[in-house]
């Protein structure tokens, strides 16, 4: 399986994708501007569930946010839950106020 890759259009919208043999196994839909990385949705193919793919996407997204000095706005329930469960791990990219319940 390939490493997660970020694919964006000219407007900064796109996804972190995990593919195997050209087939999309998981994606994390995002939008990026100068200050923020907004995460909308994370989805894993049913045949790839239970393999930790969502966590791989999360790790890649957080690494990108850190490299680019972005704040993450976790609209995605999965990302929001991970940030709330492990606030110390993500405190540098999430201030805890940028949440849509």
Image: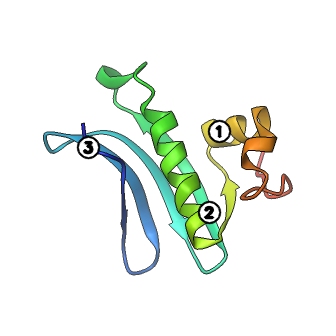
Residue 40 at what x, y percent from top left? 57, 52
Which label belongs to residue 2? 3
Classed neighbour count for the residue bearing mark 1: other residues with Cα under 10 Å, few (<14), some (14–19), many (≥20): some
Q: Position of residue 77 (x, y in %)?
A: 65, 39
Marks 1/2: CA–CA distance: 21 Å
1 vs 2, front mark: 2
Q: Would you identify the image quadrant in which residue 34 lies?
A: bottom right
Dot 2 or dot 3, earlier in sequence: 3
Dividing the image into 4 quarters, which one contains the N terminus? top left
Q: Quadrant of the C terminus?
A: top right
Task: Categorize mark 2 by other alpha carbons within 10 Å: few (<14), some (14-19), many (20+).
Answer: some
Could you say where residue 45 lies in the image, as x and y percent from the top left?
34, 30
Q: Is residue 71 above or below residue 43?
A: below
Snapshot quadrant of residue 36: bottom right
Write down the residue under mark 1.
77
Please determine whether, in this image, residue 9 is positioned above or below residue 91. Answer: below
Q: CA distance from mark 1 to mark 3?
A: 25 Å
- Which sits earlier in the primary sequence, circle 1 or circle 2? 2
Cβ–Cβ under 8 Å for marks 1 and 3: no
Query: Residue 75: x, y in percent?
Result: 66, 50
Q: Earlier in the sequence, mark 1 or mark 3?
A: 3
Residue drawn 15% across the image and 45% down it: 22
CB atoms of marks 1 and 2 within 8 Å: no
Q: Which mark is residue 66?
A: 2
Local crowd size for mark 3, using a 10 Å CA cut-off: few (<14), some (14–19), many (≥20)? few
């Amino acid at each position: 399986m390939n490493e997660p890759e970020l694919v964006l259009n000219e407007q900064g919208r796109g996804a972190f994708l995990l593919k195997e043999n050209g087939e999309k196994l998981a994606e994390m839909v995002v939008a990026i501007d100068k200050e923020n990385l907004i995460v909308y949705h994370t989805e894993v193919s049913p045949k790839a569930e239970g393999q930790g793919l969502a966590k791989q996407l999360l790790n890649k997204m957080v690494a990108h946010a850190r490299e680019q000095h972005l704040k993450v706005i976790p609209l995605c329930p999965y990302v929001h839950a991970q940030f709330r469960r492990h606030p110390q791990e993500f405190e540098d990219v999430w201030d805890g106020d940028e949440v849509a319940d």
